Amino acid sequence: MQIKITPLTNTHSHLEGIFKAKNCYYLAKFHSAGIVTEIKKSDNWLEDEMSWVSRSEIPFVTTMRHVQLRSQHLVEGVLTPVLRKFKPFYVTKEVDKFPSRDECMQLVYKYCDYASDDGYDFYKSRVKENDVVRLFRKFDYRNDLFIRAGSCLYKAYILLNTSHLFAEEIYNNAFIAFEAMVEHLKFKNGFSGKESRNKVIDLIGKYLEKDNPGVDFKDYEEEMRDAIRNDIIHPFRERSGERIAQPFLMADYIFEDLGLIDWLFKKIIEGKLK
C-alpha cells in the first residue's frame, strides 16, 4: 500500500482537531497540521492531469471543507499544502497497512518539521468525527464528475489562499466545477437534448427557492456565464454589443460565486439536490 503525507501550509489558520475517515487522517493540533492518505492503485496518480493531488484525496479534502460549510460562504483552512517553487511538498511511502492514529500523528509531526520552521494557528468549530465520516461516505469515489468538481474547487481554494493574482483562474476553476455538477444532474435526471442544461438550472433554482429563498438562479447563472465568456475569455458583451478592451473581474464574483457553487456541491453529494 502506498500512502501520502502532506504537511499543510502555516500561512493561514486550520480547523483544530484530529479526524479519521477510512484510510484518510487529518491532524491540526499542538504544533503541526497535515494529512495522511492512501493512494489507491486505481488512482492512476501521476499519469493524469491531477498530479498535484491523488484521486483518493479528493473525497477527503472535499469532506473536510464541506463539514465546515453550513451556508454559502468561503471556508478558512482548506487543507492547502506547503507550496515550494513549482509543486506542493509531500512525501510518499510504501507500507504494509494504513498507519494507526498514533503513527499518522508522528508522520505529520515529522514532515511538518521538514516543511516549515514556523508555528501554526488553529481555530475551533463544532465539528465531530462522525460528521466527517458521514460526509466522506456520501462522496462517490467512482463518480468522475464528482472528482472533476472536487478537484477544481480544491484547486480554486488553493489558488485563493496563494494569491488574488490568480483571480481569473480561481473563477474559471469554480465554473468548471459547476459545469461538472450540471452534467451530473443531467445524467441523474435523464435530461437530454438542447434544453437539458436549462432543465438543470431550473432544478437548482427550485431547490434554492426552498433552501435559500430570494435568489433568482436563472439570472444568477446567466450572469456567471456572461462574466466567464465576456469579461475573461472574450471581451465582448453580447447583451449590449459593447467591446471591452481590458476584461475585468470583480471580487464579488469569487467571494460569492465560489461559496455558492461549493455549497451546491455539498447538497448534491448529500443527495438533497437531485
Image (cartoon, grey):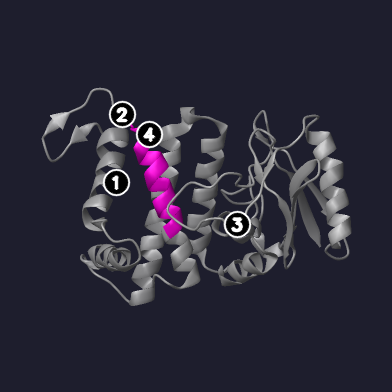
Looking at the image, residue 6 sits to the left or right of residue 240; the answer is right
Q: Which residue is mark 2?
A: 248
**Residue span colored magenta:** 249-263
Identify the amino acid type marked 4.
Answer: Ala
Residue 224 — which label? Answer: 1
User: Percent position (x, y) of residue 54?
Assistant: 65, 54
Is residue 98 at all visible to an observer of this figure?
yes
**In the figure, 114 relative to 261: above or below?**
above
User: Percent position (x, y) of residue 38?
Assistant: 74, 60
Residue 58 — which label? Answer: 3
Q: Which residue is mark 4?
A: 251
Looking at the image, residue 24 sits to the left or right of residue 169; the answer is right
User: Percent position (x, y) of residue 186?
Assistant: 34, 69
Q: Residue 23 occupies which quadrant of the picture?
A: bottom right
Which of the two discs, 1 and 3, labels the residue nearer the N terminus? 3
Determine the CA span between mark 2 and mark 1: 13 Å
Which of the two discs, 1 and 4, labels the residue nearer the N terminus? 1
Identify the amino acid type marked 2.
Answer: Phe
Q: Marks 4 and 2: CB-CB under 8 Å?
A: no
Asked which secondary structure carries label 1, the reply is helix
Determine the CA span between mark 1 and mark 3: 25 Å
Looking at the image, residue 107 sits to the left or right of residue 271; the answer is right
